[in-house]
Image: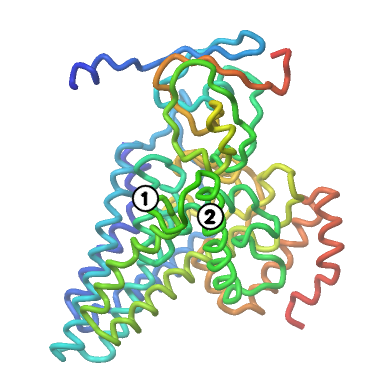
Amino acid sequence: MLQRLLKRKKSFSVSVSPGNHHFALDRKETLLAGALRVGLDWPHKCQVGSCGRCKCKILDGVIRPEIDFNYVLTPAEVNSGYVLACQSTPKTDLKVTVNLLNKGN
Amino acid sequence: MRKLYVNARYLLVPAMTIATIIGLYLGGFYVWLGVLLFGVNTILDTLTKHIHLRADFDDSGNSFGVKGFQYSVMYLMLPIFIVLQTALANNLYKFVSLGVLEMSEIIGSILSCGLWAGLGIIYGHELSHNKKEGFGVSRAIMALSGASHFTYAHVFNHHLDLGHEKDPATAPRGRNVYAHAWLSHMGQSKFSYDLERKKLEQTNSRFLSIRNMWLRGYLYSLPTIALFVWSGGIVGVVALFAVWSISNFLLEALNFMGHYGLIREQNKPVEHRHSWDNDNLFTSWFFIEIGRQCDHHVRGETFFWELDDVQGPNYGIGYFSLFVLTLIPGLFRAFVQKHLDNWDSNFATEGEKKIIEEYFPNKTRFLGA
């Protein structure tokens, strides 16, 4: 248990498609916060998990949800891997897909 | 030294709540200490109305606030508020069963407890934005005042619909604080109920289930109800009603002051202009920066000690001073009219001005004439 805690990664890599963007995400940082930090034009509005504007699809990897996504996303979205980026911290390296506002970023 | 100053200045409420508890246990005149402190705070707030500080950061842009310390204090407030209610229950028992307390002492105890229990909102609010264990602590603190629904409604309703009629916590122009307290409280509970019902339907869960967070929130209040009924019988029920009324009134008064009369077009982003700041020195320290509403509603999950002045709409006075004005609706409207005029002229967009003209064409009628 202690060994697992000591070995726990502090940072994970995130790949964003389309566009082939990559950035490192701190274990306690939300996906949205990390994306905005590196300048990605990730759609968002409320940043508290209520509007759903920042939703994205996890293609590979596991996130830690900060809230129950069922309040904002439909069951079909939840079942097909959609999450709220502002309420998701990484548990593993991630591959995600989202429609960035400015595709040229 | 700077770090100590920045972190220690937010300890006013914990210190004064503990003083109020001690007052309740000492009995006699001391049970009124909580009420007296509120009066003293109003004076201090008024005296410091011209002092406005900015958030403190070092040269590298790092905050002096220590997250571990501030969160420990906020979590510690849960048992402190429980002890506050227990102190009142103890006095109820002494009054009803032992007959060793005077009527004036029990009235003082109820008022002191109600006023300080109401300050649970500042911790319940801050922790509602921490979605992990803090969210649960927020719910537990709010449940002590029978308002556990607040945590969900605040995040999923208020932050999303602020400044729009869909947000019960935003007071439209012309409403007084007494009507707002009732309408906002019931509206937020209704929102929380609808939110749960929708979630449970979507996930094929029954309404009467452990997954129903609206229902669970009210169940969290059962220990408080049991404590007051056990300690004071019918008198305990009256005391509980009084304490919950006072504490919920304070909660809704903060909502009332934070957004009164401000307007936002549906589907337009929440911006600094959709909140009123109350950020003089005493209010900032006492209310752990909850008065920096303009910044908070744009950066919802920013720690309170990092919130700053963003040059948004500002009443220019603190919460204690403004709260006294809200208690006299005519006086509050006279005070707020110049601020609304300024907002309409210098902050409102063309779309927002159209809403004002359509729904609030005769501004003078709000002066109570």
Q: Residue at x 56, y 57 (%)?
A: B194
Q: Position of residue A33 (x, y in %)?
A: 53, 27
Residue B32 percent location from the top left of the image: 30, 79
Quadrant of the rendered structure where residue B120 is?
bottom left
Count the marks: how many? 2
Q: Rounded to the nearest whole Å, what is the CA distance between mark 2 and mark 1?
A: 38 Å
The N terminus of chain A lies in quadrant: top left
Residue B5, quarter of picture:
top left
The residue that appears at 43% across and 56% down in the rendered structure is: B122
Residue situated in front as seen by the camera: B158 or B318: B158
Other-residue count near label 1 (Cα within 10 Å), few / some / many at <14 / 14–19 / ≥20: many
Q: Position of residue B180 (x, y in %)?
A: 60, 71
**Mark 2 vs 1, N-terminal side:** 1
Residue at numbered disc 2 = B197
Outermost top residue: A20
| Side of B275 where A93 appears, left or right | left
Three-letter amino acid code at disc 2? Arg
Q: Chain of mark 1?
A: B
Residue at x 79%, y 57% (from the top left corner): B344
B124 above or below B67? below
Q: Secondary structure at mark 2?
A: helix
Looking at the picture, does residue B357 appear above or below residue B11?
below
Q: Quadrant of residue B15?
A: bottom left
Q: Which residue is mark 1?
A: B10
Marked residue chain, label 2: B
